[in-house]
Amino acid sequence: MQEMIKVGISNHHVHLTKEVYYQLFAEDLTVRNNLHQIGQFASNQTVDIKCGDYELKNLRIIGPLRSYNQVEISASDARKLKIKPPVRKSGDIKGSIPVTITGPKGSVTLDEGVIIANRHVHFSNEDAKKYNVYDDMPLYIKVTGAKSGIMDAVAKVSDDGYLELHIDTDDAFAFQLNNDDEVLVVDKI
């Protein structure tokens, strides 16, 4: 594979189950804006999180509601919270960092859920076939410009995938990347 694709930068955010969401909010989850990934959206609702004595405020909930509760943060956020969360694929929260999530209606404490999301490239099933890519396949991202370099990532194949590299704000700052910049994805270097 060798293809130029767009970059999508993820700020810290939260995925919640219906059960936990309604413990935190009295109203339904509402769409602020749609994301490139089909059916995904940034909601109008935000929460605060606390790990030990430290907290982060106004983390946006990404919809739709999920089958798991997860808080995705950057390494910079982790330093502010004085924690060391694992770097994981979204949804892989087993044994991750505990967290208290607070909304306008109340708080919920979870035994696990805080991760740093690994870098990943979303593929639809059709794109995965086209580029001969499988889920969790190692990929490499070549970045050109003032802060050029190579970063690793994994393929994330799904029915609703939209071809895009997802990185967090730390990676974006390190490589001086912005949303919709283009990078080269290769399967070997």
Image: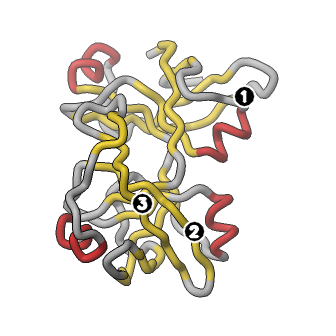
**Residue labelled with disc 1:** 149
**Residue labelled with disc 2:** 56
Inspect the image, locate mark 1, and give the three-letter code of the amino acid beneath it: Gly
Do labels 1 and 2 touch, CB within 8 Å? Answer: no
Do labels 2 and 3 touch, CB within 8 Å? Answer: no
Q: Residue furthest right?
A: 146
Q: Examine the rendered structure and indicate whether residue 155 appears above or below residue 73.
A: above
Q: How is the image coloured?
A: secondary structure
SS under mark 2 = strand
| Residue 137 placement (x, y as % from top left) | 39, 36
Q: CA distance from mark 1 to mark 2?
A: 31 Å
Q: Is residue 17 visible?
A: yes
Residue 14 sits in quarter: bottom left
Q: Nearer the viewer, mark 1 or mark 2?
A: 2
SS under mark 1 = strand
Say which of 118 and 134 sits in front. 118
Q: Nearer the viewer, mark 2 or mark 3?
A: 3
Q: Examine the rendered structure and indicate whether residue 131 appears above or below residue 82.
A: above
| Residue 182 placement (x, y as % from top left) | 57, 17
Q: Which quadrant of the rendered structure holds the C terminus? A: top right
Q: CA distance from mark 2 to mark 3?
A: 11 Å
Q: Which quadrant of the rendered structure holds the N terminus? A: top left
| Residue 56 placement (x, y as % from top left) | 57, 68
Position of 10 compared to 143: left or right? left
Q: Examine the rendered structure and indicate whether residue 74 appears above or below residue 120.
A: below
Q: Nearer the viewer, mark 1 or mark 3?
A: 3
| Residue 117 placement (x, y as % from top left) | 48, 52
Residue 126 sits in quarter: top left
SS under mark 3 = strand
Say which of 164 and 135 sits in front. 164
**Residue labelled with disc 3:** 46
